[in-house]
Amino acid sequence: MRVRQLSRALAATLIGSVLLSACVKVPVTGRRQFNIIPDGLMRQLGASTYTSMLSSETISKGNDNAKSINTVGNAIAKAANQKKYDWEFKLIQDNDTLNAWCLPGGKIAVYTGLLPVVENEAGLAFVMGHEVGHATAHHGAERMSQQLAALGGMAGLYLYLDQKSELNEKQKALIVAAMGLGVEVGVLLPFSRAHEKEADIIGMMYMAKSGYPPAESKKVWDRMEAATGGGIPAFISTHPSNEKRKENLEEWMPQAKKRYERNKLSRNTQQTLWTNADFSGGGGGGGGGKKK
């Protein structure tokens, strides 16, 4: 009985401390979000899931394309200034997939199929900024917090943190999906429209702070629209339309341009590096492109 009382006391302490920090501000936008998941836990989940996700993929290593992913990714990460994050940037060899994704704690992957769409270093900087934005805005933790609230609020969080088995399979699936993964299908699930809009804005600010022209962000969505025949790819079916994204970016463009003018790089980051012709052929890909 005493052990049970102690356990309840610890749970109450946890609940109180978590509630005090439940409402936090998102970088850049200043939006207040509901977040009850400790960042340390999310970083652990992100790292373990990243290893699992990449184990079934072919990773491009050692070539210039892979080096570009790391160079640009690290530049954006520096602008984000999250010292506790162990940033990782991987290039997945899949020429048929126009996608990139991020897990909590700064674990990011880009598919070779997306390189012709980003087209140049500045375009890549926007995509990397967008993914880094998901990480620094704690979108995965916010979504998991919402799911846990639906599972019974703080009681659900306590059970999860205590690694009990009281959560059934459906509840566990909801939690994993909240982090950005589908248990049954094994693919990444899209963030909400609000999160995508926020990641675009944060990403544009990070790219500008890193010295990349923010106007390239809108051009990336123009190229995405062209690459998908004017539609929205299945993997972002719940995302904002390309036009809506550009409107959101335009609203924040004056601030981004001010940051860019203070930090712009001396080299031309908008010269074409990747084209569709460079990545024609099988879905497995070899990491091709002009940069071998």
Image: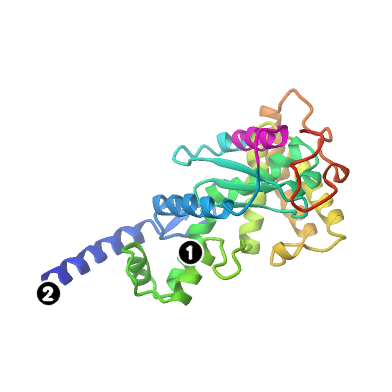
Q: Quadrant of residue 74?
A: top right
Type of amino acid at the residue the image marks with label 1: Met
Q: Position of residue 65 (x, y in %)?
A: 72, 36
Q: Position of residue 275 (x, y in %)?
A: 85, 42
Type of amino acid at the residue the image marks with label 2: Met
Q: Position of residue 170 (x, y in %)?
A: 48, 76
As helix, strand or loop, the secondary structure at mark 1 comes to: helix
Give the distance between the C-alpha atoms of the residues marked 1 and 2, in whole angstroms.
Answer: 32 Å
**Label 1, on which residue?**
144
**Label 2, on which residue?**
1
**In the rendered view, does 183 fall on the left or right side of 84?**
right
As helix, strand or loop, the secondary structure at mark 2 comes to: loop
Q: Residues within 10 Å of mark 2 (few under 14, many from 20)?
A: few
Question: In the image, what residue occupies the spot 70% across and 63% down?
Answer: 235
Residue 13 versus residue 113 in the image, above or below: below
Q: Position of residue 21 (x, y in %)?
A: 38, 56
Q: Quadrant of residue 240?
A: bottom right
**From the viewer's perspective, is the residue at label 1 or at label 2 nearer?**
2
**Foreground pick, 185 / 70:** 185
**In the rendered view, does 269 fall on the left or right side of 42?**
right
Q: Which residues are magenta?
A: 60-75
Residue 245 versus residue 105 in the image, above or below: below
Question: In the image, what residue occupies the spot 80% across and 47% down?
Answer: 117
Question: In the image, what residue occupies the spot 76% across and 47% down?
Answer: 285
Quadrant containing the C terminus is top right
Q: Quadrant of residue 14?
A: bottom left
